[in-house]
Amino acid sequence: LALARWMFALTAGTHFLFVALTLGLATLVAIMETRARDPIGQQLVRFWGHLYVINYAVGIVTGLLMEFQFGLAWPGLTDRAGSVFGAPLAMETLVAFFVESTFLGLWIFGWDRLGRRAHLAVIWIVTLCAYLSAYFILVANGFLKHPVGYVMSGGQVEVKSFTALFTNPAALLPMVHVIAGAFLVAGFMVGGVSVYHLRRDPDSPLFKRSLRYGLVAMAAAIIPSVGFGVPQLDYVHWQTHPGWWVDTALYVMLGSWIVMAFVVFLALYVPGSRRLLIYAIPLPYIAVIAGWVFRETGRQPWLIYGVLRTSDAVRPGSLLVPFIAVISLFVVLVALNVTLLARHARRGYDQPALGVLPDYVPTF
Amino acid sequence: VEILFAFFLAGYFMLSGFDVGVGMLLPLLAQGVRSPGANPTGNEDSRRLVLATIAPFFLSNEVWLVATLGLASGAYPAREAALFGRVTPAVVALIIGWIVRDMGLWLRGRLDSSRWRLACDTAIVAGSWTIAVSWGAAVGVLLGGGLAMILPIVAYCCAFAAHGAVFATLRLPQPPLFLSRRLAQGLLPITTLVMVGLALLAVSRLPGGAVSGHSTQTLLIAVTVSALPLMLAAQAWVWWTFRARVEGPSYL
């Protein structure tokens, strides 16, 4: 049980970090592309689009592992509650992920083949599908915290009301909270990288504009992130099953929020302090992971609160081999992602890879 | 639901069969293919050109399998759990092969170093073979296991490779050394039929299992069928946009 639990916690937590940047950055890139009417604006889309794609590609494979893990390590969940829990997950893959990925391929490789409007429409569809994905996942996740709209029949959890399942407040409130968090992650990333480049080249029009996007995203998200966080506290059930790590996670999240709010305030009103943004890039990540730990461990020992215990859902037997394989794979993936993002973020915009093929000389 | 399940898996075999097959035969296909304007001795560039045949498609191809899995976990929760018991090693190998290959594909062009690209190409080839072998092994286990597993493994590998070779031949600027365009055109319907057949074989060997509640099934069918036009339109747009033959290297 301990291994399966750690495997799930580490993989889901990591996947969530990828998702947070994907969700926020997709939106920012879509907005950038909507407003890209001059060459600088288009270069900006290419620069951030490139980082977005790297993160998305590595994020997908972490998601694949998640999908398989339910069947592999937690058969009890699908056995007992598959009808309820599986429905939103199935819709996520079928509707949201399928369309999102298909259109993302079109966006990446269709840079020079699609018209400007078509290309813009494609990135907006990708972004909307990403939100739809997040919604379905939170419906499944919200059911674990606050099971609604179900009946028990013969030891099986069956759906009684889909309306209740899909309008679960334990899914809708975190939706806004998660979106705000994603904007913070992306905003700090965009802001921090822009400041890094502006320190070397203070007049770069591209990174000046980029910095504005980052600042707007941070400023817009900092208040909603806490505003929609607080009302969900009831659904986390942390008061009933306190463990030191649950409280610690809550304090870490709140602490990093206070630091972030301070940094955002300074960056907005004291331009000289913006250098802080470079070092602040990890802050929203810390908040996101702490929030995740708080939310997912607060309901323990229940997997579905009051319905199914975590220990009854796990596959019996040793999971040592898959555990080692999966964890080492994830370590490599995270390392790859961080290295590549850092390298490409540092390199600047003079070597855009999206849509331009400088080494291609047609001979036909 | 059974029909939708078979539909998505067949879609995966038919479409992703192209990119897995091309990945398996990458070094072979790159022989004799010259990237226009590139260094004539650059094997690296030839491989990049071969990869450009599948570049715009592989992401939208593999989502068919993800959709199949999603449908399975929503509609046959018990079956998924039961299945994992018996074919776990094959499934784990499939996932690892899939991840290794995708990382090779996505990240190949992201670092400018020959060693990096060679490592990524190796990942693509090894990962693609692992995928084909895992499918053969999974079906082999479902057919009874033992030594008889060798037959499905060989069959699935050959089918994937042939399907990929045909696809690359039709999309490369010049056909590879071992296959002409005309022959590939004739072979395409055959390999496609074989891939669909192998997908249906895999579906037919799945163990039965308790289906999920009636209301869940109805909802899933309704949602899938109503989303299907959008999904197919998206796929059709991709295939239409990149219908032309490859002329130069791509983003990968």
Image (cartoon, rainbow, N blue to C red):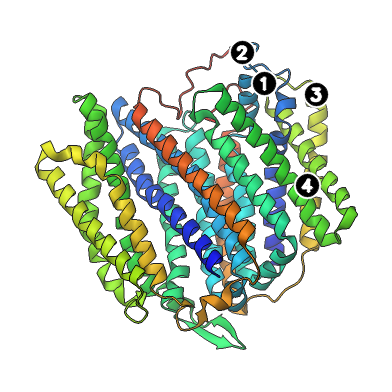
Chain of the residue under the numbered disc 4 shown in the image:
B
Tell me, yes or no, if residue A87 can be seen here: yes
Please state which amino acid type lies under the numbered disc 4: Met
Please state which amino acid type lies under the numbered disc 3: Ser
The quadrant of the picture occupied by the N terminus of chain B is: bottom right
Q: Residue at x 44, y 48 (%)?
A: A125
Both marks 3 and 2 on one chain? no
Do the CB atoms of the residues marked 1 and 4 lie less than 8 Å apart? no
Along the line of sight, which residue is nearer the eye, A349 or B75? A349
Report which quarter residue A118 is drawn in: top left
Do the CB atoms of the residues marked 1 and 2 lie less than 8 Å apart? yes
Q: Earlier in the sequence, mark 3 or mark 1?
A: 1
Say above or below: B161 vs A155.
above
Please state which amino acid type lies under the numbered disc 1: Pro
Q: Secondary structure at mark 3?
A: loop
Q: CA distance from mark 1 to mark 2?
A: 10 Å
Residue named by callout 1: B173
Structural crowding at the residue carrying mark 4, measured as other residues with C-alpha within 10 Å and reported as few (<14), some (14–19) or many (≥20): many
> Left or right: where does residue A275 sit relative to residue B25?
left
